[in-house]
Image (cartoon, rainbow, N blue to C red):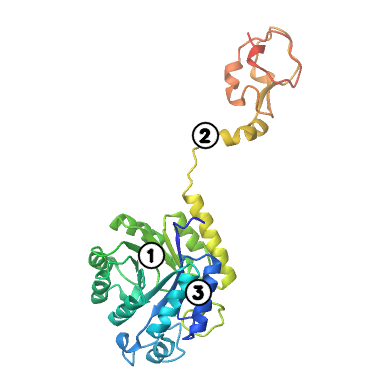
Amino acid sequence: MNESLKIIAEIGSVHDGSLGNALKAVEAVANCGANVAKFQTHIAEAETLPDAPMPSYFRGEPRLEYFKRTAFTEMQWKIISDHCREYGVQFLSSPFSLEAVDLLEEVGVEIYKIPSGEVSNVPLLEHIVRTGKPVYLSSGMSNWQELDQAVKVLRPGGPLTIMQCSSIYPCPPEKVGLNVMLEMKHRYGLPVGFSDHTLGQAACVSAVALGATVIEKHFTFSRMMYGSDARHSLEPEDFRELCSNLREAETIRNNPINKDSNTEYSEMKRIFEKSIVTRRDLPANHILEISDLAFKKPGDGIPAARYSAVLGKSIKAPLPSNRKISWEDLK
């Protein structure tokens, strides 16, 4: 399998605080063909005030209580990380506080994903830069000024990839904004990716065709599961299909063809293209006119495109109707 394209399965908090669910999710995304199993590391008191509002798309319980209930201990994160390694996928978790970065450093995370809501959290960015590890930066709800600042802060650190993202759940096709991904590539001269919140697959495939090197898509066992992300995620069969489609799109993108190299089409050209043939019986010494010619398969005679080259020439010997004309027939 060509592994140059990173496919991130965003498990997030779909595990709902169950270590068993988290481990089974790792197994599932590995079987689907993802490179990376991504989680979210929330330390409730370190990232949110008790009265912080829930987003409009999920009001199941107070934000602080939700983060507390679904959080894992350092030991549990190590178990998850080891499980990722066992199943051949990279462990990744987005930190939402300085303390979360410290926890992930203890766990041994190899790469960081900065979520959209943390782009302007300069202290967090600076803390991550000091690790020297690669970073995926989600652009989400940020404007260009905020992205410029974030990129400036992050450049001294590890390798940086910027990901186009529309922080809309679910995101309609007209709000995907892949033009922004192309602008980011031009503006920053860095690899680009795409974090997808649409309900389908077309946006991800389009992003790969346009040069994305990283794709992130939400994963769930079922859209009926409780939580903030499940109903906007792909179930296993759909996620497996997405991974297959993305690999195929990558192969297409990475294998340009030469239109002047027709060796693969030589047999098809012979079968389907047209040769110059006689429209009727022609006597010897007849001077060819356009009304004498027809153009028929196969294409192994004088090509139809060369018809003007035979006009005005005389034929050496009589030619029957419906016969391919050759250069040897002409004086």
Identify the residue at horizontal 66%, vertical 34% (top origin): 272
Q: Name the residue under label 3.
A: 26
Q: Which quadrant of the figure contains the C terminus? A: top right
Q: Position of residue 172 (x, y in %)?
A: 48, 69
Q: Mark 1 points at which residue?
A: 164
User: Answer yes or no: do the residues labelled 1 and 2 have beta carbons within 8 Å?
Assistant: no
Label 1 is placed on what type of residue? Gln
Of the two numbered discs 3 and 2 on the same chain, state the one appearing first in sequence.
3
Provide the secondary structure element on which disc 3 rests: helix
Query: How crowded is the residue under tag 3: few (<14 C-alpha within 10 Å), some, or many (20+)?
Result: many
Identify the residue at horizontal 55%, vertical 73% (top origin): 28
The vertical placement of 316 against 194, above or below, is above
Residue 44 appears in view: yes
Q: Disc 1 and disc 2: Cα gap in Å? A: 37 Å
Q: Disc 3 and disc 2: Cα gap in Å? A: 45 Å
Identify the residue at horizontal 32%, vertical 57% (top origin): 190
Q: Position of residue 158 (x, y in %)?
A: 29, 64
Q: Residue 105 versus residue 4: which sits nearer the camera? A: 105
Q: Residue 82 versus residue 219: which sits nearer the camera? A: 82
Q: In this view, does 313 lie to the left or right of 2?
A: right
Mark 3 or mark 2: which is in front? Answer: 3
Q: Position of residue 264 (x, y in %)?
A: 58, 36
Provide the secondary structure element on which disc 1 rests: strand
Residue 171 appears in view: no
The vertical placement of 79 against 279, above or below, is below
Mark 1 or mark 3: which is in front? Answer: 3
How many numbered marks have been drawn onto this rendered protein structure? 3
Q: Name the residue under label 2.
A: 261
Label 3 is placed on what type of residue? Val
Q: Is residue 310 left or right of residue 156?
A: right
Query: How crowded is the residue under tag 2: few (<14 C-alpha within 10 Å), some, or many (20+)?
Result: few
